[in-house]
Image (cartoon, rainbow, N blue to C red):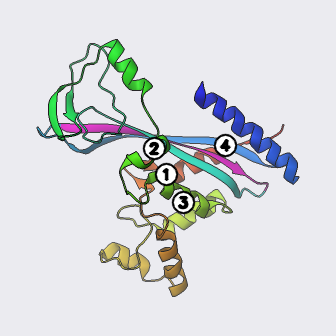
Amino acid sequence: MKKLSMLVVAVFLCASFAFATGQKELSMGVGHSSNFRIGPGKDSTGTQVYSFNYVYATVIFDAKGKIVDLEIDALEVSTPNYDGASMPHFSGWPGSPELNFTDHATEKVAGTAPNTPEAVTAEVAAWKSKRDRGDAYGMNPKNDWFHQMDAYEKLFIGMTVDEVEAWTAKYLSDVNGRILNPAATNEKDKAKLAPLSDKEKAMLVDARSGATMSINDAHGSVVGVIRDAWNKRKPLGK
């Protein structure tokens, strides 16, 4: 209900924005992508960790297809043997074999995770998206996931989806999906940097000051959700 009410508010605000600014040809799309991941890593007993990512975006487009505003978030859920304290867990369907549980303080397996209906209900109810996890996400103490995603969103405003795809194809590393680092030593990145102008390299340095995380890796495709939002767009105020 909370997510639904937020979406209703978003639609109302977008329609109000369109009316106030005279932009009657705005459209909005809600896109998503999902993927299963082997990892991240293994627990202290060598047992594999598994996870999945559900990335989603709400994007507003103008009459020319340019992005007026967007909000991207993701839900990442792992097996209970992952050692990150803020990571949402799923301990399995009730009645299935219990999975290893890792104590977050010691980062060691400390038994198995209960998967009774009550335990799993509480577990799922406590899930938080990456934005909801905030600075507890733990990627960067000074520039965590939601800050970096804000930087990407700001970067993409004013572009069409085709331009977003062209920009990321040209300026993201094919090795790790991050914004190219002009100081890279990896041969593949160096080859991709070689034809770029000094102005483009300076732009990359500026872009990297706000975001260095990958947006196209095992955590999902951010560009993919923007394209999906475009494909699903509907006109506002009609």
Mark 3–mark 1 contact, CB under 8 Å? no
Residue farthest bottom in this picture:
198
- Range of magenta residues: 48-63
Q: Quick one: SS at disc 3?
A: helix
Mark sitting on residue 130: 2
- Disc 1 marks which amino acid? Phe
Predominant secondary structure, magenta span: strand
Residue 224 visible (yes or no): yes
User: Which sits earlier in the primary sequence, circle 1 or circle 4?
Assistant: 4
Residue 4, quarter of picture:
top right
- The residue identified by callout 1 is 146
- Alpha carbon separation for disc pair 1 and 2: 7 Å
What crowding class fits label 4: few (fewer than 14 Cα within 10 Å), some (14-19), or many (20 or more)?
many
Mark 1–mark 2 contact, CB under 8 Å? yes
- Disc 4 marks which amino acid? Gly
- The residue identified by callout 3 is 152
User: Which sits earlier in the primary sequence, circle 1 or circle 2?
Assistant: 2
- Residue 179 place in picture, x, y as percent: 45, 67
Location of the C terminus (image quadrant): top right
